Image (spheres, helix red, strand yellow):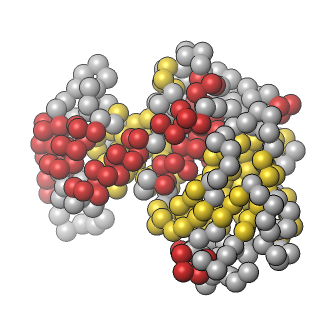
């Protein structure tokens, strides 16, 4: 996997945060039960902007104009954005790209790398529309539960859903999405908290590790190897080096990944992660966070971190999320059906605001 600076950033909101819109919720494109044309929506958004400007005249900061808050439709969004170029702060869309919660094929979709690849299209198209429209507005995911109609118990609230969720966070950041709002903090079968005990579901810990480890600058990646390995990389958050996110969708194969660097690193800020036996040539330590399902059951609502159950204590405190310290000369071993965050503090790139290390 080659890495290079992409200059992206992604904030993570772990609660329902459907934005306020001038005319309602999920009315763009073909709508949900009802629809509003892009031209009419642009007119209403302009009216909202004028009201905000009048109320907040001489007062700052003003509320953001966030719209439209519905499912992505390329033609509708392009027309709407072109008519609101100077007033829109945020363009927001909703994501339930796995289909209905009652779909018995949800797990197969989540574990299918080709299906996951196809989910990038809305992010990619919206990024292109924003870049070519001349607007300064940024892209947000205003609501994302994966599977609509409340998700599916023991799928969207179980370990297996972290494959979809973390892949979505990595993918959306690659295409310059600034904020990703999860549906929901609590409620339905896709909440981050158990609706009965209020204890964290697996995705809560996935979100927490993402929040703690993945910095604002996103590095472009190109993994060479198994198609069932999903890989993303960011500059580390409030720390030196970079953080990798590796997702192994294979149920049988452990993928060993080795880090290599070459003389192109200084000019192109590029490194490679490969499945061959190459080495950095220097003994240093990295931090690894291995996420697996309890007893290997993808439908488990208990996540394991480095072999230990993640459970709150009697006071409701979140357990410490401690990494394994691993010699850099050892390969990154990504077990079947597992997720690994890897913080590599000794590898710094110009893209991350530091001098590049020599190897």
Residue at figure coordinates x 29%, y 58% from the top left: 131
- Compared across the picture, whether 315 is left or right of 35 comes to right
Image vertical order of residue 349 relative to residue 136, above or below: below
One can see residue 21 in this view: no
The image quadrant of residue 160 is: top right
Which image quarter holds the N terminus?
bottom right
- Compared across the picture, whether 288 is left or right of 230 comes to right
Image vertical order of residue 201 relative to residue 208, above or below: above
| Residue 338, percent from left and from top | 75, 41
Camera-nearest residue between 267 and 211: 267
Residue at figure coordinates x 75%, y 54% from the top left: 275
| Residue 343, percent from left and from top | 72, 64
Camera-nearest residue between 128 and 195: 128
| Residue 81, percent from left and from top | 21, 48
The image quadrant of residue 3 is: bottom right
Camera-nearest residue between 83 and 118: 118
Residue at figure coordinates x 55%, y 16% from the top left: 103
Image vertical order of residue 204 relative to residue 28, above or below: below
The image quadrant of residue 238 is: bottom right
Camera-nearest residue between 305 and 298: 298
| Residue 52, percent from left and from top | 20, 54
- Compared across the picture, whether 188 is left or right of 20 comes to right
């Amino acid at each position: 996997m080659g890495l290079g600076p992409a200059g992206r950033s992604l904030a993570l909101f772990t609660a329902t945060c459907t934005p306020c819109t001038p005319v309602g919720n999920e009315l763009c494109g073909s709508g949900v039960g009802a629809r509003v044309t892009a031209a009419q929506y642009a007119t209403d958004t302009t009216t909202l902007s004028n009201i905000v400007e009048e109320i907040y005249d001489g007062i700052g900061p003003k509320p953001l104009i966030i719209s439209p808050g519905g499912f992505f439709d390329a033609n509708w969004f392009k027309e709407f954005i072109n008519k609101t170029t100077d007033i829109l702060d945020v363009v927001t869309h909703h994501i339930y790209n796995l289909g209905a919660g009652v779909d018995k094929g949800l797990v197969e979709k989540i574990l299918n790398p080709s299906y996951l690849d196809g989910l990038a299209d809305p992010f990619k198209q919206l990024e292109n529309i924003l870049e070519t429209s001349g607007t300064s507005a940024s892209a947000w995911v205003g609501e994302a539960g994966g599977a609509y109609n409340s998700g599916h118990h023991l799928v969207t609230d179980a370990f297996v859903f972290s494959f979809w969720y973390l892949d979505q966070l990595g993918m959306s950041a690659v295409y310059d999405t600034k904020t990703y709002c999860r549906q929901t903090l609590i409620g339905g079968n896709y909440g981050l908290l158990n609706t009965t005990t209020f204890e964290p579901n697996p995705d809560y810990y996935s979100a927490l590790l993402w929040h703690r480890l993945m910095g604002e600058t996103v590095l472009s990646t190109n993994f060479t190897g198994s198609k069932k390995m999903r890989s993303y990389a960011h500059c580390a958050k409030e720390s030196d080096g970079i953080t990798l996110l590796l997702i192994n969708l294979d149920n049988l194969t452990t993928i060993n990944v080795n880090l290599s660097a070459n003389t192109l690193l200084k000019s192109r800020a590029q490194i490679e992660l490969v499945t061959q036996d190459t080495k950095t040539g220097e003994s240093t330590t990295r931090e690894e966070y291995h996420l697996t399902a309890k007893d290997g059951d993808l439908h488990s609502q208990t996540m394991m971190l480095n072999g230990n159950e993640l459970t709150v204590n009697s006071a409701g405190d979140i357990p410490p999320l401690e990494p394994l310290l691993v010699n850099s000369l050892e390969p990154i071993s990504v077990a079947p059906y597992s997720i690994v965050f890897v913080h590599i503090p000794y590898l710094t790139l110009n893209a991350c605001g530091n001098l590049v290390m020599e190897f």
